[in-house]
Image (spheres, rainbow, N blue to C red):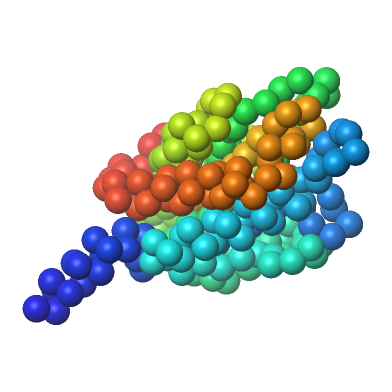
Amino acid sequence: MGNWLILALLVAHPAAALTVVIDPGHGGSNCGAVGPGPQKPIEKRVTLAVAQALRRELERRGAHVVMTRERDAYLTLGERVRRANGARADLFLSIHANASLDHSRRGVETFVASRELVDVRAATTARGAHDPAYAMALRAQVRFIAGESARLARAVQTRLAATRPGDRGVRQAPYDVLDGVQVPAVLVEVGFVDHASEGLELARREVQRAIARALADGVVDFSGEPAATVARR
Ligand SMILES: [Zn+2]
């Protein structure tokens, strides 16, 4: 009977028992990208609004959510990473909005830590281990998390690209905020705030909610798939 109850709860709440850290990019004096025109969509506001909508979507699906910031406040990268690692989370989503030099680009993309960053992290993590077998296990753990980050990125990007125009794909970047987090971590660029029409769309509640629903669906897809059993090199 008890097992059936747990099963029923899991079916009703596909993200049940997941702890997700949401990191709304920028904040306070760090505005991020700023769009043109009188409305001037500002990245820090878009990221917080999408993050708050995502929190509601994930909680509705049964997940436990921790935010690195809940208001317009400045946070260092180190503080974001500390809050993420302190939450004993299952995964980490950093929310950002883009800008391009000629203001012509639009679309969505999801970043994971670059291979170089993962290599350095694997080496430094294993450095303190005196036992070679333990060092190997530590390196394998770092690579496993990198593989899971890539799987999370694909799940999120697939849902996002089905919701918003312009699939810019999954990419690698040496972002510090992705480096220090010890769980599967991605950075999502939900659109370009400086694009004449996309910037205005990103400031709209219903667009922010649609993006949040897509991200939450991606998290559910990720958590429902079997984890990669072999660390990829
Ligand atoms: Zn940003």
Quadrant the C terminus occupies: top left
| Residue depicted at x 9% and y 78% | 1
Whether 92 is drawn above or below 107: the answer is below
Whether 164 is drawn above or below 219: the answer is above
Q: Position of residue 57 (x, y in %)?
A: 48, 58
Q: Position of residue 140 (x, y in %)?
A: 40, 48
| Residue depicted at x 87% and y 33% | 36
| Residue depicted at x 54% and y 61% | 55
Task: Decide if residue 208 is on the left or right side of residue 214.
Answer: right
Q: Position of residue 201 (x, y in %)?
A: 68, 37
Residue 98 appears in the rendering: no
Residue 83 occupies which quadrant of the picture? Answer: bottom right
| Residue depicted at x 67% and y 26% | 106
Residue 27 appears in the rendering: yes
Task: Decide if residue 191 is on the left or right side of residue 134.
Answer: right
Whether 121 is drawn above or below 35: the answer is below
Whether 100 is drawn above or below 3: the answer is above
